């Protein structure tokens, strides 16, 4: 499901960082409920994106977690 959000934000250009980014997001999701931007960036630390930087990833992660937490609270 997170892959759709990454694609929607245009961060799937070369695919180099995709698997690491997704694994970091899944770990973040299980570790911190409603993380702030700084915490999200901390979890992305060490995962190199050479195409887009991390602005698109940050937008995608925020949207994904917002939807995920809203679904879980129902």
Image (spheres, helix red, strand yellow):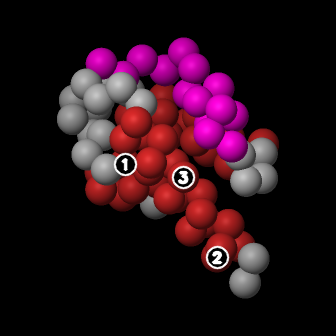
- The stretch in magenta equals 36-50
Quadrant (top left/top right/bottom left/bottom right) for the C terminus: bottom right
Q: Is residue 28 above or below residue 1?
A: above
Q: Is residue 7 magenta?
A: no
Q: Residue at x 36, y 26 (%)?
A: 53
Q: CA distance from mark 2 to mark 3?
A: 14 Å
Mark 3 highlights which residue?
Answer: 62
Among numbered discs 2 and 3, the one appearing first in the sequence: 3
Q: CA distance from mark 1 to mark 3?
A: 11 Å
- Does the image show residue 19? no
Q: Is residue 53 above or below residue 31?
A: above
Q: Image quarter for residue 27? A: top right
Q: Nearer the viewer, mark 1 or mark 3?
A: 3
Label 2: state its secondary structure: helix
Mark 2 highlights which residue?
Answer: 71
Question: Whole-percent x and y of residue 12?
Answer: 27, 40
Q: Image quarter for residue 15? A: top left
In the shown orientation, is residue 72 left or right of residue 41?
right
Q: Residue at x 71, y 73 (%)?
A: 72
In the shown orientation, is residue 3 left or right of residue 39?
left
């Amino acid at each position: 499901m997170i892959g759709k959000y990454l694609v929607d934000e245009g961060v799937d250009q070369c695919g180099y960082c995709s698997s690491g980014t997704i694994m970091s997001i899944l770990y973040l999701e299980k570790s911190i409920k409603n993380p702030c931007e700084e915490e999200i960036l901390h979890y992305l630390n060490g995962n190199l994106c050479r195409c887009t930087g991390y602005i698109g990833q940050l937008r995608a992660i925020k949207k994904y977690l917002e939807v995920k937490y809203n679904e879980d609270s129902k």
